Amino acid sequence: FPEHGYLGAEGIVQYAIRIGDLRLVALDSQKTGQTPGELCDVRLDWLSSTLAEDQATPTGVALHHPPFSSTSTMMDAFGLHSGGPELAAILASTHQREAAE
C-alpha cells in the first residue's frame, strides 16, 4: 500500500488510528512465508505500549488471524499459532476494557 506511508514499506505493519470517538489498533499477525499467524514479543510489546498511550479512548484491536477457536476447521488451522495467551493477558489488563464494561 504505497499510498499509505504510515504503514511502512516492509517488515511488521502495525498502526493505531483515531476514527471519530474510537481508536483502531491494527496488529500484524502475519509470519512471512507462513499461513498460520504469530504474535512475537516485538508485536506484543508494541501493542502493550500503544494501548498504554491512550487509556481513555474506546479502542478496538484487529488482527488477521483469529486468536480464538472460530468453529471453522479451515480458520482454526490457519489461525494464530503463537502469542494468543500473551495477547489475552494484555487485553485483559487494559483500562479501555474497564471503560467498556
Image (cartoon, grey):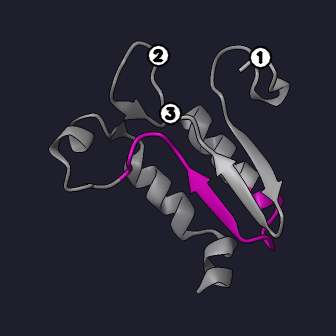
Q: Is residue 33 magenta?
A: no
Rendered image: mark on residue 101? none
Determine contact: label 2, label 3, CB under 8 Å.
Answer: no
Q: Residue at x 82, y 70 (%)?
A: 21
Which one is in front, 7 or 55? Answer: 7
Q: Residues within 10 Å of mark 3 (few under 14, many from 20)?
A: some
Q: Label 1 to label 2, Cα distance in Å?
A: 19 Å
Q: Label 1 to label 3, Cα distance in Å?
A: 25 Å
Q: Secondary structure at mark 1?
A: loop
Q: Residue at x 63, y 61 (%)?
A: 60
Q: Is residue 66 magenta?
A: yes
Residue 55 in the image: above or below residue 3: below
Q: Amino acid at mark 2?
A: Thr
Residue that badge 2 annotates: 32
Which one is in front, 75 or 80? Answer: 75
Instruction: Locate residue 69: give its quadrant.
Output: bottom left
Q: Amino acid at mark 3?
A: Cys
| Residue 53 in picture, x, y percent from top left | 82, 57
Residue that badge 1 annotates: 2
Over which residues does the magenta segment extend?
51-67
Residue that badge 3 annotates: 40
| Residue 64 in picture, x, y percent from top left | 47, 40
N-terminal of the pair, mark 1 or mark 2, is 1
Is residue 12 found left or right of 78 in the rendered image? right
